[in-house]
Amino acid sequence: MKANVTASSQSQPVAVVRRNSHSRYQYKKVLDGRKQPIRGLWERNGKFIARIAMEDDAGKKENRWVPLESAKTIAQAQEQLKTLHVDRTRNDLPVLKRTPKFADYAAQYLAYFDSVKDAKRPATIQKERGAIKLWTEHMGGLRLDKIRRLHINSFIEKRQAQKISGRTVNLDIIALRNVLKRAIDDQWIKSLPTENLRPLKWTPRQRSLVSQKEIESLCDAALEVSKNGREFADYVLLMAYSGARRNEALRLKWSAVDWQAGQLTIGADGLNKGREIRVVDLNAKLKEHLQAMSKRRAPDSEYLFPSPQRGKVDTHAKTFMESLRLARKKSTLANFSFHDCRHFFISYCVMSGIDYMTIARWVGHKDGGVLIGKVYGHLNNEHTQAQAARLNFSQAQPAKS
């Protein structure tokens, strides 16, 4: 590993070499202007090297050879040697250790979040784990300080050749950046090889707006083909009437329903995206649906959607994906996804004339409605244009009084 020993050297481990008496180029003392040896400064093969006592990872001090790569003159070498001594006095001198390979360090990174609770959401770690696995397959044998932009670019090219969306590749790069940021904190590298890397452009998939009738037909199909059809139908309708995301809806407890205030609290468990807690005011459909669900509530569970295999330990359902596959096959909505429920809710909020800030608060957008305006604003235009088309100027004039 190579490193420039300057004032900024504290941000990455110092490269060291061991003296070999049998090597072709011998170490020679560097002399000052009076032909006196400069303590701790040596020369080998035309390059300056410092000899300094440093701590290994066990705290044991040993003398090590540190290449002064950028030093071209004796004066520059002396200045860099002084910097090393200052760093050591301040306890800023890095521990002696060889830079780990990406695969090994990535494993340590994931192990940390496995052992430290609430450091990141489980869903976030799961997504990072998948992306890091891809990076490990691509360049796991490289040491952290050897990772260059060309390695990242080749990964991007490979992913694009596999027809992976730009959004997904951008998320892969974010996962890599998170690992390398931790490497900077641990003083293994000085800077990010992803610095100034622009995200790939991508076009969001245009979702067709499902209707109330289509959602109900999907639920009816689930009742026919799935043993969990009733719970699946309740789950889909709750998301459609509240805008809840699929995982946060699964984790809802009955304590989140405030009948008196007419509100549903989402994210009280702290596991939501951004760890945000938000309140959705009960609209007529949502209130009616929750009341119907309450009559069917399982007496031994505090969850709106208890797991069918919960046994003696109360827990929520993990997924309704199998029921969704069966219901899609039975109905005409072959491409329906759970996110379409959220799209349905936001779309009909917009077309109902509800202001964007209120919608954003209900669905957990932090931008005050900017995204809703960009993505769903056209629905409002279509709605108002449809109303304008109904205007009739040819009607009979009202009689004069």
Image (spheres, rainbow, N blue to C red):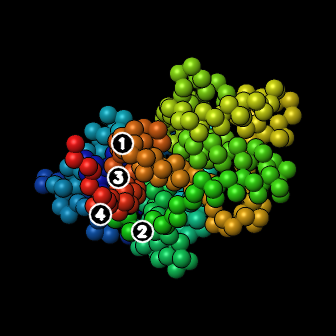
Classify 335 as above or below 267: below
Badge 2 vs badge 4, beta-carbon distance below 8 Å: no
User: Toward the viewer: 219 or 298?
Assistant: 219
Q: What is the spatial separation of the Cα atoms under label 1 and label 4, in whole angstroms?
A: 33 Å
Q: Quadrant of residue 19?
A: bottom left
Residue appearing at x 63%, y 56% in the figure: 213
Q: Secondary structure at mark 1?
A: loop
Q: Residues within 10 Å of mark 2 (few under 14, many from 20)?
A: few
Instruction: Tell me residue 104's x, y (percent).
Output: 59, 55
Mark 3–mark 2 Cα distance, whole angstroms, equals 19 Å
CB contact under 8 Å: marks 1 and 4: no
Residue at 78% in and 61% down? 326
Residue 218 location (% of width, % of height): 70, 57
- Which mark, residue 202? 2
> Front-most of 86 and 200?
200
**Label at residue 16:** none
**Whether label 1 touches label 3, CB < 8 Å:** no
Mark 1 vs mark 3, CA separation in Å = 10 Å
**Which numbered dot is residue 373?**
3
351 relative to 282 in the view: left or right = left
User: In the image, what residue type sits under mark 1?
Assistant: Asp
The residue beneath circle 4 is: 394
